Amino acid sequence: MLVDTGAMLDRFPTKQADKLHRPRYPVSGLGMRLADDRLRILKNYCWLDVVVAWVLAQVKAYEVAVSQTYQLLLSRRWLKGVRADEYHHTRTLFIQGRDCVRRKVTGIPIRGTGVKLESIDSAPFCNVEDDEAEQAIQTLLNELDHWEKKKAGDLNSGN
């Protein structure tokens, strides 16, 4: 897995989507520009249950028809969802799940990681319609941003 703090969407290669045999859902009117300035139209996404350091998160991963050296790219959305604190100089993340226990994740180079994604035949823990889920996620992210700005303002004002 690769964590990209600049990415807005979680994504994974089509080849990996084929291996996982997860239900695919269509996307319309959504694209992304790659680092080499090529435009890719996104056609499908899958819901994936991702566990990192015993922290479970469900991600909406978009299928990208390009070859990659990683099996899953986790974005800013995942980082917010697991309340990540990043320390780039030590390649360390601290993340937490619903149990509010902070867990340390040390970054390792992508080569030779031995990490493998596998499909688990179980229903996702969240089963809502796409538009409802997207709206709920966006609302929560906006509220989190507002709360963080208010908290920073309170700290600056001495409250």
Image (tube, grey):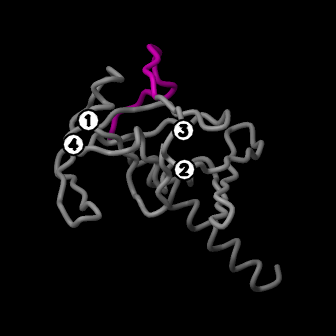
Q: Are marks 1 and 3 in contact (CB under 8 Å)?
A: no
Is tag 1's residue or tag 4's residue first in the polypeptide sequence?
Answer: 1
Residue 128 falls left or right of residue 58: left
Quickly name the residue at label 2. Answer: 109
Q: Quadrant of the C terminus?
A: bottom right
Q: Residue furthest bottom?
A: 157
Look at discs 2 and 4 and give the one toward the viewer: 2
Residue under numbered circle 4 = 65
Q: Quadrant of residue 113?
A: top right
Q: Mark 1 or mark 2, which is nearer to you?
A: 2
Alpha carbons under labels 2 and 4: distance apart: 23 Å
Query: Which of disc 4 and disc 2 is earlier in sequence?
Result: 4
Q: Of marks 1 and 2, which one's residue comes earlier in the chain? A: 1
> For the residues carrying marks 4 and 3, which lies nearer the camera in this image?
3
Q: Are marks 3 and 2 in contact (CB under 8 Å)?
A: yes
The magenta stretch is 117-130
Q: Secondary structure at mark 4?
A: loop
